[in-house]
Image: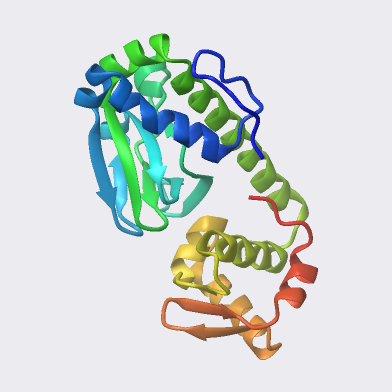
Amino acid sequence: MAASINSSDPGMNISDESLMALLSQLPEKYPELKQAITVQRVLPWDCIAPKEEIADHLYIVVDGLVQILITSKEGRRLVTSVLRPGAVFGEESVFNFSNRGPNYCAQALKPSVLWKIPAKQADDFLIKHSELRLALLRTFGVRLLQVENRLEEVAYRWLPERLAAEIIRQSRYAESNQIRLSHQTLADILGTYRETISAILRDFREAGWVKLGYRRITILNQSALENMAGIVRD
């Protein structure tokens, strides 16, 4: 159970659920924040915000799952992090970070709800409200850890191991043994080519580990995938 906290000193010993509970109270407590928030509802695979929008707004994930991805000049896409409720992105809008590359995007993984706050108001609210600062700090930590984990996988694991790990990871996100992803989407997540992913998935199918359908993968042998993947970190 999460430690008891108060809004003036949240501390770091707090669960994601408790942090989101704190954030959800802010609009009612502070009318100026409520007026600044635009509620944005998005469907799976919708681009929540292109680079131009993110440069001018701070976003808070209220419900669902959001992934941050980049696209190379060659058109290859790579997911760098997956954000849960309570996470914040668009920090460059308030911290004057250097502009991201032109092909940076936030995308929903499942039906999601976000708060969108203009940069000027977000800057003021971050100064006033420790809950927002904590959410931003935690998001930095989660994103850094996810990037480190993905770099470790790329450096030390061969692609079938990484694909098995991603199938397990996506099943956790979906809370189901069936994930609704195209081969191209999996290739984007892993930074490789669709044809390569399709070939490995056919091997998994022939081994009896998965069942393949249109934009759908059903896990038939969880243990075999786990043995292939090793430790799977979010």
Q: Is residue 80 left or right of residue 30?
A: right
Residue 64: x percent and y percent?
Answer: 42, 51
* Quadrant position of the N terminus in the picture: top right
Looking at the image, is 208 positioned above or below residue 143? below
Q: Residue at 31% of width from left, 50% of height from top?
A: 47
Give the number of callouts. 0
Looking at the image, is 207 positioned above or below residue 78? below
Which image quarter: residue 53? top left
Q: Is residue 69 left or right of residue 11?
A: left
Q: Is residue 109 visible?
A: yes
Looking at the image, is 161 positioned above or below residue 58? below
Q: Residue at 75% of width from left, 68% of height from top?
A: 226
Which image quarter: residue 38? top left
Q: Is residue 87 visible?
A: no
Q: Is residue 144 left or right of residue 215?
A: right
The one of 155 and 141 positioned closer to us in this rendering:
141
Residue 183: x percent and y percent?
Answer: 48, 72
The one of 84 and 167 positioned closer to us in this rendering:
84
The residue positioned farthest toward the left in the image shown: 35
The residue positioned farthest toward the front in the image shown: 4
Q: Residue at 80% of width from left, 70% of height from top?
A: 227
Residue 216: x percent and y percent?
Answer: 47, 78
Residue 108: x percent and y percent?
Answer: 38, 52
Q: Is residue 111 left or right of residue 161?
A: left
* Image colouring: rainbow
The one of 205 and 234 positioned closer to us in this rendering:
234
